[in-house]
Image: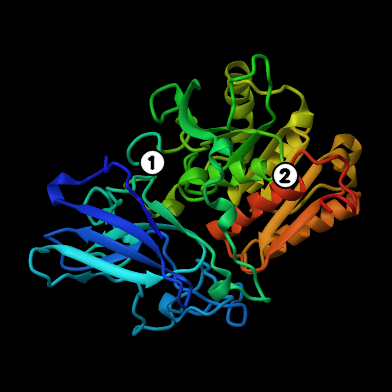
Amino acid sequence: MLLHHTFLGIFALCSLRASASVTVRKTDKGPTGYEVDFRYTNKTANRVLIGGGMQAFSDQFHTTLETRAWYNPRDYQPGDFYVSHGAPPGPDYRWPYEMERSENEGEDGVWTFTTPLPSGIYSYAYLIDCNYAPNCSIDTGQLVIDPDVPPFLNVQGDQVASSFQVPFDRRFQGTDDISANFDYALPAPAEFRGTVKSVNYTSPGSIHPAPDVHHFGLYLPAGYGEAEGRKYPLLYLSHGLGGNGNDWENLGRMSHIMDNLIAGGHIAPTVVVMPSFYNLDGSLPRFVYGNRTNALEAPPPSVQHVRENYERYLFPWVQEHLDVCAAPSCRAFAGLSLGGRLAYEMYVNATAYFDYYGLFSPAVEAPYVDAAAAAANPELTRKGVFVAYGLYDFVFERARGLQAALDALGVGSLARVTPFGGHYWNTWQDELWWFGVKALWKPLPFTAQSGR
């Protein structure tokens, strides 16, 4: 079985005469049951690496909050997973995703690479004569987005990686230790497939993508707009530090996850708005993802500033222009990392607007909500809060501290500790899935029987 991406290469870099393809093949043999073939044409390159999100693998016996193993995917064993933290083992370590230049006649400038990979969504870019993605840029031609698998984005430069997915094969990947089956992010049956698009909205003061215009990604469930007068539940889903509203679709395949949550009867058909919290105004330097991949250098706005801006411009625009319900009981806010901290900000200071909150790897900081806060805002104890983080996540202790604070207040929150999770997209995909299965739109208050 071939799963071959055939998207139009709208980002082909003609000046480099670059073309590419990624093919996922079912092999019915170890180590994973699947292989992925990369093919890239560039006649001027001397060396080509595959980076932009690809990772070496580790396992639960060699992973801590600071360190991990660095296994080649060709050495995969059931239960192996990837995290993004930790330093390579030494100066002799060799990156496992290095392409080879073809020596076949008629394939001048063709670079190839084949590797087994287990279930998951993988983001990637080609690094040309450059050994580390944050040191490469689109401007210099050293970071090349796959021209045949363009990312989901609003304007060029908003994303620096493409993505593909490998299915799960229990015969080779199954283990009693850790389940790393990401098939919930494969395409759902056709009748359940929603649509995802980029939307620009009026936001006075915004400096990107245009003056006084801001952007969000939008997921509409299958059947949206077909029944006159129907109003849909609404989930706001935030990116994290150094990201934007395209991330959840481009790197997390959220539309497939939502489709499958709906198809499985876990949630009602739901509209999802994925806003961007950078460039809301000129108070900070303009930040565009694309030509500077070391996004951690970009100073983020405060979560209070973001909340106030959304309340002033985004929330009213969404209510006016989309068929969404207007009650807190059918509104939710969730986010990853700094977006998880933003979800916490909404919980504390926009309590009346939402009934459900998803805090995925939340970059929260003490002091947390306490008895005085609950006395001043009793609604805090009646909301649905879902806190999730990875076992190897650097926010582990902070998230546990928040859970302890919620427990002390008697807030019936739900929790998920992703057993293979670091601070990365495989963790956040897992957390979005379980947020939908166990928490979103479920009866409140949460109790010991919630999600059972």
Give the image location of residue 69, x and y in percent: 51, 80
Front residue (pair 290, 188): 188
Image quadrant holding the C terminus, namely bottom right
Compared with residue 210, is residue 162 higher up or lower down, i.e. above or below?
Answer: below
Image quadrant holding the N terminus, namely bottom left
Image label count: 2
Q: Which residue is mark 2?
A: 266
Tag 1's secondary structure? loop
Residue at 49% x, 22% y is 201
Q: Which residue is mark 1?
A: 158
Neighbourhood count class around disc 2 (C-alpha, 10 Å): few under 14, some 14–19, many 20 upward: many
Front residue (pair 306, 259): 259
Give the image location of residue 432, x and y in percent: 64, 49
Left or right placement of residue 451 versus residue 85 in this view: right
Give the image location of residue 137, x and y in percent: 28, 53
Name the amino acid, label 1.
Asp
Give the alpha-carbon distance from disc 1 to disc 2, as whole Å: 32 Å
Of callouts 1 and 2, which one flags the residue occurring earlier in the amino acid sequence?
1
Left or right placement of residue 263 versus residue 39 in this view: right
Compared with residue 163, is residue 342 higher up or lower down, i.e. above or below?
Answer: above
Residue at 39% x, 64% y is 25
